[in-house]
Amino acid sequence: MINRACIIRLSRYRQTLIRLKTLNFVKVFSENLANSAGITAMLVRKDFSLIGISGNKRGGYQIDDLITVIDNILGKDKIQKFVVIGIGNIGRALLNYPNFKQIGIELAAGFDVDTAKHNRESAIPILPVDELGKFVKKHGIRFGIISVPEAEAQNTLEIMVQTGIKGILNFAPICLKEQPGCVVNNLHLETEIENIIYFTNAEEKARSLNV
């Protein structure tokens, strides 16, 4: 299994490769990808060796070949279907985000306990949570997003795991632990914002001390 840090870098490489392809580039060098990802060219080559890609230092890498291999590893060689549990502000924003299909993601449905939010006729239907299991089985859903209040997050996770969902992105402000047979990734917006504030202030302070 490739470690998480490497997977994050592969995603960044892919974004750069897509941009270069739109500019009609055919080849790329490890130095180009290193600069875009803020790492060393040696680490780029090490990552590629882990996934079975070899290149010529003078000739570089074929962009189309790299995209094909990375897409296969990241699961972007086919559309990946997700469901969203909790249609509050974050959930609604996710359902309305227009660019998911461009990155190989389809939001198949939203689910909520509030009957006032249910809408079976919308482009992305919003359904009762008690229909989640049936929907997941019928449509072969493997991934889900939690965007419920903190108090409901753990129970929501357990329900999703019971339905057979294998990968979960958690937006609720609580760290949920991975369950047997299910990967959970916690994205805490407040923590991310606090990190930005701290490191920005720390860098400004360091600069002022060096003046």
Image (spheres, grey):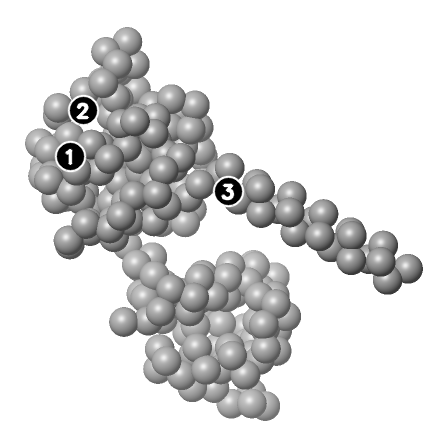
Could you tell me if the residues under marks 2 and 1 are in contact, i.e. CB atoms within 8 Å? yes
Instruction: Give whichever of discs 2 and 3 has the lower sequence position.
Output: 2
Under mark 1, the amino acid is Ile
In this picture, residue 143 sits left or right of residue 185: left
Relative height, residue 120 to residue 141 (above, below): above
Q: What residue type is labelled 2?
A: Val
> Toward the viewer: 29 or 182?
182
Residue nearer the viewer, 174 or 161: 174
Q: Mark 3 points at which residue?
A: 191
Mark nearer the N terminus (3 vs 1): 1
> In this rendering, which labeled residue sits more in front, label 2 or label 1?
1
Q: What residue type is labelled 3?
A: Thr
Q: Residue at 28% of width from left, 32% of height from top?
A: 153
Residue 208 visible to an observer of this rendering: yes
Residue at mark 2 to residue at mark 3: CA–CA distance: 28 Å
Q: In this view, does 16 lie above or below 194?
A: below
Q: Is mark 3 on a helix, strand or loop?
A: helix
Q: Where is residue 91 in the image (x, y as percent from the top left)?
A: 37, 28
Q: Please tell me the numbered disc located at residue 129.
A: 2
Instruction: Answer with the quarter of the image where residue 210 lies.
Output: bottom right
- Is residue 136 visible from the viewing direction of this image? no
